[in-house]
Image (cartoon, rainbow, N blue to C red):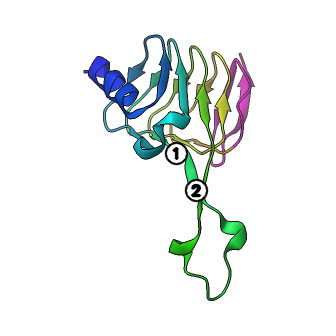
Amino acid sequence: ATDKRQKYWIKCGAHINGKINIGYDVYFDASNAEYITIEDGVWITARCLILCHSRDMKLYGRGIDINSLPHIRKPVHICKGVHVGMGSIIMPGVTIGEGAIVAAGAVVTKDVSPRTVVGGIPAKLLRNL
């Protein structure tokens, strides 16, 4: 089943280089999939969320309809051998370095260094591997 998910992501425009595993109920920003790059050996476990766009909140203020704000699109790059734990959220503009581990339930708002473990909300360095 994970092969079918990978093929679907590619069909939507995601750049997948190699074989990856995608768990059940993983949401990705399908309408902006061309901003997603995933390298070989990545595991994205169940119920994760990968976002590539957000509203431009710099323009938001009293009397402004939030729905009128433009979207900002930023790439997400998940490097070789990364493991993304269950229920994690990957925010726009993030690169997760080679061999890194994202703990379950983490919200990744900044780049993750290679061969590290991050966790929490927002995700912070837990240890170097």
Query: Is residue 20 shown left or right of residue 62?
Result: left
Quadrant in the rendering for residue 115:
top right
- Amino acid at the residue labelled 1: Leu
Instruction: Indicate the position of residue 78 as horizontal and vertical percent values.
Output: 58, 26
Q: Position of residue 14 (x, y in %)?
A: 46, 29
Is residue 54 inside the magenta stretch? no
Judge whether residue 123 is colored magenta.
Answer: yes
Identify the residue shown where x is 66% and y is 41%: 93
Residue placed most toward the observer, 26 or 6: 6
Disc 2: CA contacts within 10 A as few (<14), some (14-19) or many (>=20): some
The dot on residue 54 is 2
Checking the image for residue 51, the label placed there is: 1
Secondary structure category for the residue under label 1: loop
Image quarter in which the C terminus is found:
top right
Q: Amino acid at mark 2?
A: Ser
Number of residues whose C-alpha sits closer than 10 Å to that of mark 1, classed few (under 14), some (14–19) or many (20 or more): many
Which corner quadrant of the image does residue 95 belong to? top right
CA gap, disc 1 and disc 2: 8 Å
**124 or 80: which is nearer to us?**
80
Counting from the top left corner in percent of width and height, residue 114 is at 71, 20
Q: Nearer the viewer, residue 101 or 67?
A: 67
* Residue bounds of the magenta highlight: 110-128
Q: Which image quarter is the N terminus in?
A: top left
**Which residue sits at x=72%, y=35%?**
111
Q: Residue at x 59, y 70 (%)?
A: 69
Out of 110 and 39, give the one closest to the viewer.
39
Q: On screen, 113 above or below 76?
A: above
Q: Are marks 1 and 2 in contact (CB under 8 Å)?
A: yes
Q: Helix, strand or loop at disc 2?
A: strand
Residue 12: give x, y in percent of width and height: 38, 34
